[in-house]
Image (cartoon, rainbow, N blue to C red):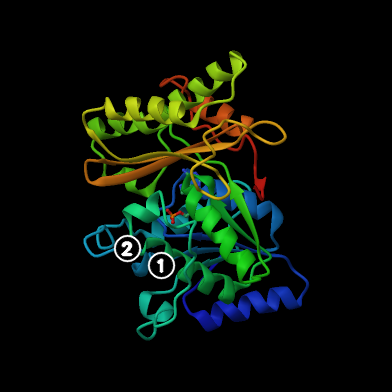
Amino acid sequence: MRRIGTVAGMRGAAAAARGAGQRVGLVPTMGALHEGHLSLVRAARGDSDLLVVSIFVNPTQFAPGEDFDAYPRDLAGDEAKLAALDGGPPDVVFAPDVAEMYPQRPVTTVSVAELTAGLCGASRPGHFEGVTTVVAKLLHIVAPHAAYFGRKDFQQLQVVRRMVDDLHIPSEIIGCPTVREPGGLAMSSRNDYLSAAEREAARSLSRALRAAVEAAQQARAAGAAPDPRALRAAAAATLGAEPLVRTDYVEVVDPDTLEPPDQSGEVAGGDRRLLVACAAHVGPARLIDNVVVGDRDDEARLLAATGSSRRSGPVHRLEPRDHRR
Ligand code: AMP
């Protein structure tokens, strides 16, 4: 495993691998690596000859007043975790500094419309433009055959997929399941900000999603299609009941378009998929989580992770990857 800090060095290493007929994989991260990130690296490791993990806290996706300065940074610790990874370390840690990635004030950005209008896009104006711009840069620098993203950031995953489709970027985008802590809290670098009491309260995000899944199951058991309004109400009530949590949003949308679903409950051709997504402020952290109701694997993972607070370990790797939608 070697560290590369320059765009030219990274471009050269990836080009050499491609020239030698090797398959190149990329896992973009902002560092402070946890088991969620590592699950992406494991999935990518099995598919890649040259595996690149990028570690870059991208300033352009943080708004003024957000946690860019406070965001945890520990490159040495991250490299130690990667070096020790079961399944094998990546070949390259691409860790450019801000001046390397943005040598001049950028006047060119990549922005994806429509899919970024709601959910986190509504709460964090400009955030996704920062994300898609830096991901486009990384995809151009590394030119991977495949890039791996977590379903934890479901809107980000769909936005990146759409960008890659619209711009004909020749990288496959692979979505990997959310890794949760015992009790169900989705792993996040921002969980580091939480006190013990806040961490306990933060479990209400995954509990809220569980309430929505259970409401869907009850509807199905009664022979009815899950009603998006009922799912949203069940999740919002659970989240709203936790005093240390301030709800940002609870939304139920179509997982492909991220638009509100048709309220009729009719679905052409089978099980209706609904994205239940939530965001909430817990102490100093803004946390997000989601589940796709109607995706039986995603439902099962969420139910297993939230079923007991006494699980012996995180629920992960039930399904190494989830190709396209
Ligand atoms: P970040 O460092 O927060 O930008 O995340 C880098 C990548 O890791 C993104 O694709 C995230 O969706 C993914 N990721 C973060 N947390 C998790 C998690 N708990 N489970 C799975 N993937 C995750």
Farthest bottom residue in view:
104
Label 1: element kind: helix
Q: Position of residue 98 (x, y in %)?
A: 37, 75
Q: Residue at x 41, y 21 (%)?
A: 309
Q: Residue at x 49, y 21 (%)?
A: 215
Q: Position of residue 129 (x, y in %)?
A: 42, 67
- Label 2 neighbourhood size at 10 Å, few (<14), some (14-19), many (20+)? some
Sequence-first tag of 1 and 2: 2
Q: Quadrant of residue 65?
A: bottom left
Residue 62: assigned label:
2
Decide which of 251, 295 is in the foreground and name it. 251
Q: Amino acid at mark 2?
A: Phe
Q: To which residue does mark 1 refer?
A: 130
Decide which of 301, 219 is in the foreground and name it. 219
Q: Is residue 323 above or below residue 169?
A: above
Asked if residue 83 can be seen in this view, the reply is no
- Label 1 neighbourhood size at 10 Å, few (<14), some (14-19), many (20+)? many
Decide which of 240, 98 is in the foreground and name it. 240
Q: Is residue 156 above or below residue 129?
A: above
Q: Position of residue 218 (x, y in %)?
A: 53, 16
Asked if residue 250 can be seen in this view, the reply is yes
Distance from Cα at disc 1 to Cα at disc 2:
8 Å
Report the quarter where the N terminus lies: bottom right
Q: Quadrant of residue 170?
A: bottom right
Q: Is mark 2 within 8 Å of ligand 1?
A: no
Q: Are marks 1 and 2 in contact (CB under 8 Å)?
A: yes
Q: Amino acid at mark 1?
A: Gly
From the viewer's perspective, is 85 left or right of 46? left
Q: Position of residue 316 (x, y in %)?
A: 55, 36
